[in-house]
Amino acid sequence: MSSYVEAAPGQNEALIQGSKNLEVGQWKPIEKITPYVEEIGRFAVMEHNQQSGEHLKFICVIRGWSQIVAGTNYRLIIEARNHVGLAWNYEAMVYDKPWEKTWKLIEFVPLLMN
């Protein structure tokens, strides 16, 4: 025997938001750059290097934002050093599926202003 329960309008959104009151699809600033976020930034630089043939060296994640989707998107401002030793800022977007333990680099672009 199966049962069917219909949710009241807005009920699913409340369940999705959970106890931290996160809204699905909305970009939220990352308050503290954790080692996990630093590793995502390091991955973004390594993946960009592999795709582009550049030889950037990861320095740090300066700041970032996260977006809850079917997983998490991270938009990070990363500082990296290029082949001549000049430090520059880049914006990277990485999609994280923690239950599959996978990251995917979506975008990696140099910023015009440091």
Image (cartoon, rainbow, N blue to C red):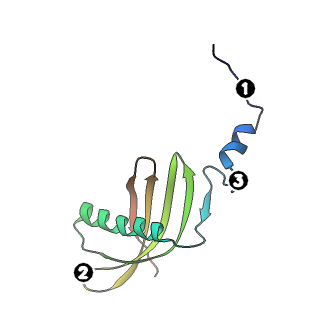
Q: Are marks 2 and 3 in contact (CB under 8 Å)?
A: no
User: Regarding mark 1 in the picture, which secondary structure is present there?
Assistant: loop
Q: Residue at x 38, y 64 (%)?
A: 108
- Nearest to the eye among marks 2 and 3: give it: 3
- Nearest to the eye among marks 3 and 1: give it: 3
Q: Residue at x 66, y 52 (%)?
A: 23
Instruction: Report the residue marked by disc 1.
Output: 6
For the residues marked 3 and 1, what is the alpha-carbon distance in whole angstroms? Answer: 22 Å
- Viewer-side residue, 105 vs 1: 1
Q: Position of residue 28 (x, y in %)?
A: 62, 62
Amino acid at dot 3: Ser
- Viewer-side residue, 112 vs 9: 9
Badge number at residue 84? none
Q: Residue at x 37, y 65 (%)?
A: 44
> In what quadrant of the picture does the N terminus appear?
top right
Q: Which of the two labelled residues, at mark 3 and mark 1, occupies the earlier sequence position? A: 1
Query: Is the residue 58 above or below the residue 87 in the image?
Result: above
User: Regarding mark 2 in the picture, which secondary structure is present there?
Assistant: loop
Amino acid at dot 1: Glu
Q: Tell me if mark 1 has few (under 14), some (14-19) or many (20+) residues whose alpha carbon lies within 10 angstroms of its own.
A: few
Query: Is the residue 105 above or below the residue 7 in the image?
Result: below
Q: Which of the two labelled residues, at mark 2 and mark 3, occupies the earlier sequence position? A: 3
Q: Position of residue 11 (x, y in %)?
A: 74, 38
Instruction: Report the residue marked by disc 2.
Output: 83
User: Regarding mark 3 in the picture, which secondary structure is present there?
Assistant: loop
- Nearest to the eye among marks 1 and 2: give it: 1
Specify whether 2 is left or right of 103. right
Specify whether 86 is left or right of 53. right
Instruction: Report the residue marked by disc 3.
Output: 19
Q: Which of the two labelled residues, at mark 1 and mark 2, occupies the earlier sequence position? A: 1
Amino acid at dot 2: His
